[in-house]
Amino acid sequence: MAEQSRTRVRSSTATRKRKSTPENTPAEVAQRAAELLQSVISHRTEGVSAVRRTDDGWCVVVDVLELARIPDTTSLLATYEVRLDNEGELREYYRTHRYRRGAADQ
């Protein structure tokens, strides 16, 4: 019986640590958003371009490698906007644009 209560405490603590709270830093939220997006779309994330707090959570802009090519400067990347709620759970994501790695911003 004592073992069961210890297990519950550990599970509860693990759940609290996993979830994003207002005390989490933008860097932690960015990492979580990139990991969640990568698990959903099955493409490798390249980095995070922006993180901002919203009224109902977080908005994170993530760059993703969608198609690797040789030479690498011709690979296709995409920018996704990922929205997380205050607990760090994925609410929505969508691709905002696609571009070649070597292309300059216009």
Image (cartoon, rainbow, N blue to C red):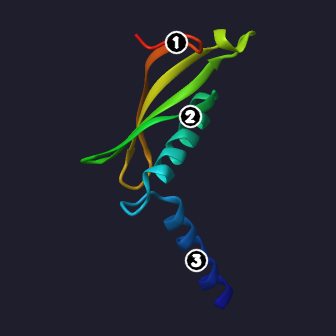
Disc 2 on helix, strand or loop? strand
Kind of residue at badge 1? Tyr
Q: Position of residue 13 (x, y in %)?
A: 54, 73
Quadrant, the C terminus: top left
Q: Dot 3, how many residues are within 10 Å of its Cα: few (below 14), some (14-19), or many (20+)?
A: few
**On the rendered structure, is 92 left or right of 15?**
left
Q: Identify the residue position indicated by label 3 in the image.
A: 8
Q: Position of residue 88 (x, y in %)?
A: 44, 51
Residue ID for mark 2 = 47
**Mark 1, mark 3: which one is toward the viewer?**
1
Q: Residue at x 60, y 32 (%)?
A: 45
| Left or right position of 52 against 95 | left
Give the distance between the C-alpha atoms of the residues marked 1 and 3, in whole angstroms.
Answer: 47 Å
Q: Is residue 1 visible?
A: no
User: In this picture, is 9 found above or below 14?
Assistant: below
Q: Residues within 10 Å of mark 1 (few under 14, many from 20)?
A: some
Q: Position of residue 76 (x, y in %)?
A: 60, 13
Residue at 24% across / 47% down in the picture? 55
**Which residue is at the far left?**
55
State the residue position of label 1: 99
Q: Is residue 75 depicted above or below 32 in this figure?
A: above
Q: Residue at x 65, y 90 (%)?
A: 2
